[in-house]
Image: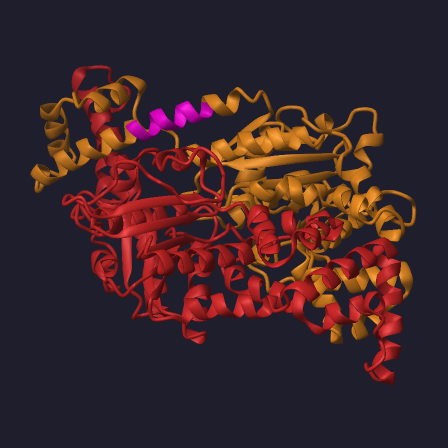
Chain colours: A orange, B red
Amino acid sequence: MTSSAMPTPDAAVTSGASASWPEVNLHVVSGKGGTGKTTVAAALALELARHGRRTLLVEVEGRQGIAQLFDTPPLPYEERKVAVAPGGGEVYALAIDAQDALLDYLESFYNLRRAGSALRRMGAVDFVTTIAPGLRDVLLTGKAIEVVRRKEKHASDAYDAVILDAPPTGRITKFLNVNSEMSGLAKAGPIHKHADLVMSVIASPQTAVHIVTLLEEMPVQETIDGIADLRDNSLPVGGVIVNMTRPPVLTDRELAMAAKGTLPPAAIRSSLERAGLAAHENEILPALMREASDHSQRVALERREMTRIEELGLPTAVLPLLADGVDLGGLYELAELLGEAGLR
Amino acid sequence: MKPSTFAKAPSLEIDDILGNLDLHIIVCTGAGGVGKTTTAAALGLRAAEMGRDVCVLTIDPAKRLAQAMGLSSLDNTPRQVPGVCAPDGSGSLFAMMLDMKRTFDEVVEGHADPERAQQILNNPFYQTLSSSFAGTQEYMAMEKLGQLRVRAMDEGTWDLIVVDTPPSRSALDFLDAPARLGSFLDGRFIRILTAPARGAGKGLGRLAAMGFGLFTNVLSKILGAQVLTDVGTFVAAIDTTFGGFRERADETYALLKDSGTLFVVVAAPERDALREAAYFVERLRTDGMPLAGLVLNRVQAVDDPDLTSEQAAAGAQTLTELAGDGSDAAAKEARLTAALLTLHAQRMSLAARQKHLADRFTAAHPGVPVSAVPALAEDVHDLEGLRTVGTLLAGSL
């Protein structure tokens, strides 16, 4: 990584707040299902690639979420450039498949590619990669760590940062910790050594685990529990990304009135007339009132949940819900917001 | 009020389903984070209050939902939820949380003599397999379902079991993982793997023996010899006491194809969740498993569909311009009304996007009935909340 070697690191090359994790080169992004962790991971990869740097976005769950997001054909087990970042940086992507990772592993460590195909015929590959997901996770994390540690010819890192679109919060600690478990199960031998090596990266300051959440009760609770879990296992906690927020449309005073049902109907009625919506104001008015009341309830809940996030005392970024769904333009927008919040 | 936006799909008649006394198992499945557990619990409660004796098997409920059902600890036994019955006093609701390791241990204890059971329970490979390997959870959910069904039939305890499925990477794992684990534990591969422990290797044929040599060599290189030994003793131990893991998995699998079973696929009106739902629907069809329909949670309700998003947004803009920077009462009122119209426009366009996604699902799967459940302002944390969800599911609010 070039930036960590420079006297004035990221602050010099990026805008906004100073980076929260200048020395991190493995960003693990987790979150409850449905919170948009793939989107956030992609936005982070774009942000970290600013100004001529190179990042790698990695997925491990075989969902091809990255390809869908960047609107490219399904990713093979091969690093492919998927986007250009502001200032000429590059984002590469890789979908790690456990079977390929196994064959890759056999080849690079034991020169056993041919044995690999024999193993496949005997159902052994299936065993290692699907029936024993513990082993599957070892392979997936192992491959991710391989790219993190990979060097170019002149000894600089192949990627300035690797961003891992990781399994959901409920599984993340187990996923990241699988190598220490494996290292206990296989008490000696190459897999033991390899597992220890992987843990030496994952449980170090060069890794940060970020959790994506929505301002809803369950995802926030999972975030809090997940962070406690990570800490209990001495895994490096990064930041919290609050995703898909909708800024309140009403002022605090109006919200309070909406909650109590005391918004002035006559005034709203006359404004509707001025807006040229007099035609069906008898239906519109009660609908608007109900919606305002719903809205105030939701805002109150969101504020309560936001307080719980703030109590975690972690670097936090707040991202808006993109009205038209997530496209490449939207990703750039989210990337910039992550940067401004110092989440990089 | 039921959102009127999903007219293209036939309606999923929840009360007809729950009232069908020939139905004994409902499986709720779908991607993570779509409200599967809540749906399962709400269906169970509603059925119990219709007079059925129900057991809800949840896998990993949120704390407050568990509390709503009176589940304070994970003890792997169905507990009665107090105060739940039909108006005539019939019906009951039991609920339990799956403890996958405990369930696996019980399978072992139930089929092996105490000494051998202890030997298995102490085996390091067994401990890893039973507590941390994914797939085990799915297998054990099926195992538990099978156990509950047997108990329901023998003792007449329950006439309906509602199952929530594990939060897998893919909803399909619930169907696939048990067979995989079963065929692994029962299969050729593990026999080869454990051949040294059983002094076998002969009878494999010369070619296979060669492959076998290469194979164990490779495995012990990768895993270390210790792991192979652990696996070997584990399999030898279970093999002599209760073979037929695959058979067990097959039996439960057959139960899922039974005419007394229905699948409810749960999704949210989002691209990924609906894609996952579509995979599952196709899979059920291929496997000849009975699909009840799709429950679509968190649907944006629409209050006044006559005022379109565009009209509301245009009205908001007019009012914002009229108000300008003014600080008089009229300007303030205009700004307030503009804000209300903006709110309406946002809701309408969200609803339109959701409808578009749901319609695409229905276009691809035209016959699949749908029940749309409006988004609730707060998460469910008591029986009353579950009751509301049940009412919304049945579309009778």
Q: How far across and down, in percent of the image, does residue B134 sit?
A: 61, 53
Q: Quadrant of residue B228?
A: bottom right
Asked whether the viewer can see residue B379, the reply is no
Residue A299 within the segment the image draws in magenta: yes
At 34% from the left and 71% from the top, the residue drawn is B259
Q: How far across and down, in percent of the image, does residue A187 sit?
A: 85, 46
* Residue closer to the observer: B89 or B209: B89
Q: Which residues are magenta?
A: A297-306
At 90% from the left and 65% from the top, the residue drawn is A111
Left or right: where A299 falls relative to A339: left
Magenta region's main secondary structure? Answer: helix
Q: Residue furthest top?
A: B328
Left or right: where A311 falls relative to A234: left
Residue B336 within the segment the image draws in magenta: no
Asked whether the viewer can see residue A295, the reply is yes
Left or right: where A47 falls relative to A143: left
Q: How far across and down, in percent of the image, does residue B72 sit?
A: 44, 33
Q: Quadrant of residue A331?
A: top right
Q: How far across and down, in percent of the image, does residue B18 sit?
A: 25, 57
Quarter in which the N terminus of chain A is drawn: top right
* Residue closer to the observer: A261 or B390: B390
At 67% from the left and 26% from the top, the residue drawn is A20
At 9% from the left and 37% from the top, the residue drawn is A281
